Image (spheres, rainbow, N blue to C red):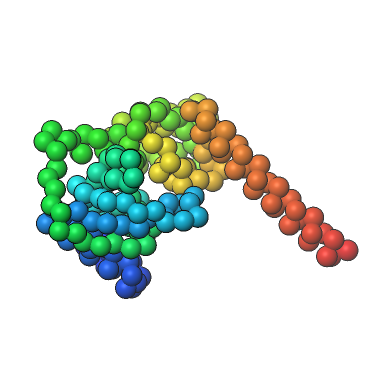
Amino acid sequence: KKSSRDLDGKAANPHYIHIYEQVAVAWATRRRIRILYQSLRSTEAKEWLLDPYLVEMTGVGYSAYVIGMARREELEKLTTFKLDRIREAELLEHSFSVPEGLDLEGLLSSSWGVWWGEETEVKLRFSPDVARRVKESVWHSTQIVEDLQDGGCLLTVRVGNTLEMTPWIRGWGPDVEVLAPQELRDDFCGWAERLHRMYEVKKDKGKRVKS
């Protein structure tokens, strides 16, 4: 029901609605679906055969995802697909059953949204300007919030994948510093350097125009 209500809030898009309906019917009737999927960093769409185990609405913009057993060529794995990136969807007659003992709720328990993996500890230092706002909400089931001497706070969570929480971290702008893991900190350092170069170039161009 929540997914249906959230879908109502998206701008009318006949293609997206068709994809959503095909996936929803496949999930509800336990039927396999053929999809043509273009991942975020891919230049081409690839065909998958998918047994949809769960349809979930989550994340910024109320994006919808389908989780299930996916097959392509010699590859077979439990994975997540974002519905916005499905180019085609065809309902097939082949039926399936969810494997006995598969605990999707447990699999997603440490996720920030719908992506899972090996748990990683993330430490974020928030400035005094936003500390109160950070402490007002429960952002994750594993979170630990500690007060800092300068009035800021330290948020620690353990997530299965840092990809989904990256836009959330970026949304805090200069009021948050990534302390760990080092790989995520390096990503943000690189992002900050690119922003700096971009604005420096625009500032220099502005000065030349004025002169």
Question: Which residue lies at the image location 28% right of the left edge and 68% below the top edge?
Answer: 17
Residue 194 place in picture, x, y as percent:
65, 45
Q: Can residue 44 be seen by looking at this rendering?
A: yes
Residue 134 place in picture, x, y as percent:
40, 40
Question: Which residue lies at the image location 42% right of the left edge and 37% below the top edge?
Answer: 162
Question: Does residue 114 appear to the left or right of 199 in the view shown?
Answer: left
Q: Quadrant of residue 90?
A: bottom left
In the displayed orientation, state which residue is furthest to the front. Answer: 73
Question: Which residue lies at the image location 49% right of the left edge and 50% below the top edge?
Answer: 41
Residue 51 place in picture, x, y as percent:
21, 49
Question: Does residue 184 appear to the left or right of 18 in the view shown?
Answer: right
Q: As rendered, which of 17 and 58 lies closer to the eye? A: 17
Q: Is residue 181 above or below residue 38?
A: above
Q: Is residue 61 above or below residue 153?
A: below
Q: Quadrant of residue 165?
A: top left
Residue 36 place in picture, x, y as percent:
35, 58
In the displayed orientation, state which residue is furthest to the right. Answer: 211
Instruction: Count the marks.
Output: 0
Q: Can residue 152 be seen by looking at this rendering?
A: no
Question: Does residue 140 appear to the left or right of 33 in the view shown?
Answer: right
The quadrant of the picture occupied by the N terminus is bottom left
Question: Does residue 158 appear to the left or right of 207 in the view shown?
Answer: left
The quadrant of the picture occupied by the C terminus is bottom right
Question: Which residue lies at the image location 33% right of the left edge and 63% below the top edge?
Answer: 88
